[in-house]
Image: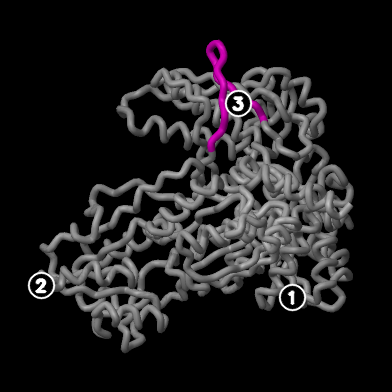
Amino acid sequence: MVFRSIYIIFSLREKILPLERTKKNEFSFGSFLTFSYLRSMILVFGGTTEGRRAAEVLEEAGSSYYYSTKTGEQELALHHGVRTDGAMDGEAMRQFIREHAIRLVVDAAHPFAATLHQTISEVAADMRIPVIRYDRIYPPRDPDITWIDDYRQVPTDIHSLLATTGVQSISKLKWLEAEGVKVIYRILNRESSIRLAHEQGATDEQLCFYHTGDDPIGDSPHVIRYASHTGDSPQSSPQGADATLLKESGLSGGFVEKVAEAREKGMRIIALKRPELSFANTVNGPYGLRRAVEKLLPEFFPLHSGLTTGTCATAAAIAATRRLLYGETPEEVAVLLPNGETIPVAVGYGDGYTYCIKEAGDDPDVTNGIEVRAKVEKATQFEICGGNGVGRFTLPGFDYPVGEAAINKGPRQMIEQNLQSILSPLTSDLSPLKVNISVPNGEEIAKRTFNPRLGIEGGISIIGVSGIVKPFSEEAFIDSIRKCMEVAKASGSERVVINSGGKSERFVKTMYLDLPQQAFVEYGNYIGDTLKIANELGIKNITLGVMLGKAVKLAAGNLDTHSRKTTMDKAFVQQMLQEAGISIDISDMTLARELWERIPESKRTEFACTVIRHCYEHCAPLLPNGELTILLIDDNGKIYS
């Protein structure tokens, strides 16, 4: 029986990876053992902001992976990831991939790490392993900046230059000094960088450092404030430099902020263009990475993500616009998501319309597989409207007034922003567009949703805040919360801040700027389970950020606020209003957030305190050995405590 199992495992491996053999053409038993217990291994080359984000995405899967950096100096808390540090040449990379049964590589290294990118490309092609390049988001190239392709192209008609291109570039810029240009080098303030700078001929007087708590890997998005090597006082323009040399490091590399500060100082800006990389699979954000992994290594994530109806409507509108203006009919289009990244979305074409098939992934959604259509025409003003199968608002309290199509604010902004990027290269006198979104059978499908209860009639809603649906079973979601809480505790943070999602987290972060990213954990709807986990792990200080929709449910004692489990109890809300001394009629209220508009501004704080008090009564007992702070957040980000 044992031999049969060994034969099956070897047979499986033969289909997945070429069997590694010793010089005597014998199988490596160590590699066999490694392979036998690994389901799907991913190797991430990180050490950057993108590397950190890649790790956060892969952690959601609960599957093992490897995270590689050159220096080991990046601070990163991993739960499922195994860290490996040290530079890899081609042979070392091949050996690592063989020994650890790597089936997918994520290249999230710095865009200027040209040698590493080339090595990854060659090794992956040789070993037939797919690569996902996690690239950065880059702003358009400003024509007022002097763009160069090589260090030898730096103009010499300057008196002095501040080079912020890293310690490795010092030797490549020494020729400028021979041309009479005074060069100051901004490097990372660590011994290894200073030593390397000296080895390349830089003097102490030529060195300056960031002094804003920068990212130790040199990818800080902070503005530039400089100090000399021998002093601590910031200098506005070190040694009187009249020009600065930057790398095209993208948004996460702080390029925009660096340009802005250099302009403020009146410095000429010279930028080294990023290397052109050619990878078949390139993403520039976390959602794109997850979807690429799901496609190339389906078993890594136990549940797969999907698209919101808003993303589908946007994709269809993009395709319809390109068809109208250029006669193009691509099979997929790039959709810009609210977080700034782009993802590819498949589209199709009908008689006078384009469409996108709603893909729910593993999220249980009655809209899975529906066709979201878009028809785009030239008009007198830009307009987004709803056609057949798209519902209408019949009650107040939504983003748009009664009678409007149930296309929420997020999708409308996505459609407009994406179409604007298509229109911008064209002449300014081009007529605006009218976008009509429709959903065949939408009215029938809507009967199986909460729309009728919310006062949306005649069809489905076009919704979506992030553009992507990340599915979790209840058990998997709670398990992911536990893992995140364990990572938060391991980070050494004095406080863990739990939030319902990205929106509330952004607001609450303004109060806890000193906390590491790992200290912020998303609870979704599972407030009670999250607090119980915090207590089990011995976390002493918890801040709970909650918005009003979930808060009124929590105040009524519902520790799981999912709409499948509970709805707003208007009678209890009315009771809390009375306790706060507020007399208003809420019998026609549909959504809890309407309260912010109905309650007089002078009474909002008292009402918020009443809600928080009731929430505290139900939550505090779950954290008997800790301190709980509850923050109630309104739609504009105002925080009540």
**Separation (CA) of disc 2 from disc 3:** 60 Å
Which of the 4 image quadrants contains residue 38? bottom right
- The residue range painted magenta reads 344-358
At 70% from the left and 61% from the top, the residue drawn is 29
Element marked by disc 2: loop
Tell me the quadrant of the picture where the C terminus can be found. Answer: bottom right
At 16% from the left and 69% from the top, the residue drawn is 175
Q: Which of the two marks, 1 or 3, is nearer to us in this view?
A: 3
Any mark on residue 356, and which?
3
Q: Tell me, yes or no, whether the highlighted magenta stretch contains residue 356.
A: yes
| Residues tagged 1 and 3 counted as in contact (Cβ below 8 A) | no
The amino acid on which the numbered mark 3 sits, given as a three-letter code, is: Cys
Q: Main secondary structure of the magenta part?
A: strand
Work out whether residue 187 can be spotted: yes
Any mark on residue 180, and which?
2
Give the answer, above or below, for where 1 lies relative to 485. Answer: above
Q: Residue 48: x and y, percent?
A: 49, 63
Q: Residue furthest top?
A: 351
